[in-house]
Amino acid sequence: MKTKKQKPRLTWTTFKGYIPLYLMLLPGLVYFFINNYIPMAGIIVAFKKYSKRKGIYGSDWCGLKNFEFLFKNDAALIIRNTLLYNIVFIILGMVVGVALAILITDVYSKRCKRLYQSAILLPFLVSIVVVSYIVFAFLSAENGMVNNGLLKALGLPAVQWYAEPKYWPFILTFVNLWKGCGYGTLIYIAGITGIDPAFYEAARLDGASRWKQITNITLPCLVPSLITMTMLNIGRIFCSDFGLFYQVPQNSGALFSVTQTIDTYVYRALMSAGGIGRSAAAGFFQSIVGFILVMGANFLVRRISRENAMF
Amino acid sequence: MLRTKSNIRYQAIINTVMMLVTVIMVAPLVLLFISSISSERSLLVNGYSFLPKELSLDAYRYIFSNRQTIFRAYGITIIVTIIGTTCNVMLSAMMGYALSVRKLPFRNIINFYIFFTMLFSGGLVPSYLMWANTFHIKNTLLALILPNFLLSAMNVILVRTYYTTSIPEALYEAAKIDGASYLQIFTKVVFPMGKPILVTIGLFSGLTYWNDWTNGLYYINDPKLYSIQNLLNKMIQDVQALQANASAAGSGAAMQIPTVSVRMAIAFVAILPILIIYPFLQKYFAEGVALGAVKG
């Protein structure tokens, strides 16, 4: 701030006037301290041989042993899965989101527009547990609709969906898109409605086709928000939707090669006997790399368009 | 738009495409519902289907005869959702208000303290160890309420922004001149005027609590404390989980479980409240999505 106002000295009497406000802040600040800040300090558990009796801080240090174990065994698979899925999700989410947003804003009838908007956001509200039931209704080996309805009608043999890894990258991608694309679409609709209608009017007078208008007006105007969304997503590229990868494949061991991500690994290792070390190491890796990526992504967004940066 | 021939054709095309998308979005939920009212026999023969051979309400009858388990889980979800959402909204409102007072000393430090929780997180392991071993919340109702969802930095920031931008400074001044204290300004002026944003964040907080199954997965293994999502989570592998309490109470145990349809019936019952309120509060849901998008 350039115009520095003379700050009045903070005296006890002026401070006293603010005490009610501090009291209103207090419960929330305490909650953040417990729920967020204590675990932040607790990530040092990744360098310890945790013992329940001694607690996080009292346990003995063990150097990088947890990381050695993690990187020798499982790291490559879980990092590969997390990254690949996220890259596919980011690209598809953007393409489908923008396409649907353009279609919906072009719909002339107000009532239809509302209907489409409501419909695409609906899956977003359904819990992932219920989603896994719906997927089960389609894919269950004995009673699933795909095996009993589709494949039988086509004369094809039934597939043991929950035991065949090769199909799951597609299934998970589809489920993610089905559940999540409404969210992105609504954001892009907001972006498109913000475009000055005068641009389109001028283009129409010049006889530009609808396709020309999309490629020359709509898409360029959306670029800032597309960049921002992508950067935010890249900041979270080491995080995965635990429910999608744990719940939807129903925790099936046969599918781990294509469903194990950092988040499912952290949970499974944490709950298995003696797995807490590698779990903590994977979690530490995710937290630190995630933090670096969020900071880096924000730095880039700031350089491209300041007002879209988080801070 | 002009009603030219090419425009009419264009409208026909995009409406067809969007109708198709709408069907893809809604059809899976329809399948869930139809499966829940299909007869067990037709499910065993033909599998889950949009056009079952035979309809039956056996699954719902079974749910009702085993109501201890399901109604209990439902009740727990309702209690947790109400308490959690109320706390979330109240805490966010109070913090948002205090931080919207520009002259508040140390305001920037506190803002940063809150914001930093969005940038860095300790992750599951330390937070699990803390809640389970330091605070001993395992197998208590608190385990479903406290971890993670009670308050989020995002909500505080949304409320603070709303208060600073949508409530005119003059209103505060007028209240000040009338001799109102900060607390009175909050309860009489700011809280009532900020209702739209509180409804929006309350809706999303409620949705989070209603749909959450992770806290239950981490901290609850007592079936008496299962939320509806946790009950579903257990049932997908083992429908017998439904009878965990039934035999003790001694009713409905004799009835054969329509395993294939009852799963879908409970899943449908779990999303029913959302399906009911969605049409009425759709505006707030859409607004919340747009708001959340502005800042991460």
Image (cartoon, coloured by chain):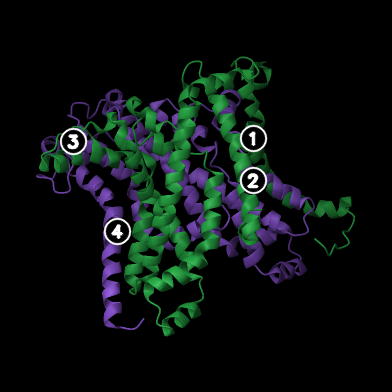
- Residue drawn at x 13%, y 37% is A156
A222 is higher (above) or lower (below) than A44: below
Chain of the residue under the numbered disc 4 shown in the image:
B
Q: CA distance from mark 3 to mark 2?
A: 48 Å
Q: Which mark is residue B22?
A: 4
Between marks 2 and 1 in the image, the one whose residue lies nearer the viewer: 2
Chain of the residue under the numbered disc 3 shown in the image:
A
Which amino acid type is marked by label 3? Asn
- Residue drawn at x 68%, y 21% is A57
Indicate which disc, 3 or 2, sits on the residue closer to the N terminus. Answer: 3
Indicate which disc, 2 or 1, sits on the residue closer to the N terminus. Answer: 1
Q: Which mark is residue A295?
A: 2
Between marks 4 and 2 in the image, the one whose residue lies nearer the viewer: 2
Q: Which chain is green?
A: A
Residue A208 locus on image (x, y percent): 40, 78
Count residues near mark 2 (Cα–Cα under 10 Å), then give few for <14, some for 14-19, many for 20+: some
Are the numbered discs 2 and 1 placed on the same chain, yes or no? Answer: yes
Of helix, strand and loop, which one carries label 3? loop
Chain of the residue under the numbered disc 2 shown in the image:
A
Report which quarter residue B281 is drawn in. bottom left
Q: CA distance from mark 4 to mark 2?
A: 38 Å
Name the residue beneath numbered marker 3.
Answer: A143
Image side of residue B77 versus residue B248, left or right: right
Count residues near mark 1 (Cα–Cα under 10 Å), then give few for <14, some for 14-19, many for 20+: some
Which amino acid type is marked by label 2? Met
Q: Which mark is residue A34?
A: 1
Q: Which chain is purple?
A: B
Image side of residue B276 versus residue A34, left or right: left
Q: Which mark is residue A152?
A: none
- Residue drawn at x 63%, y 52% is A300
Q: CA distance from mark 4 to mark 1?
A: 43 Å
B151 is higher (above) or lower (below) than A110: above
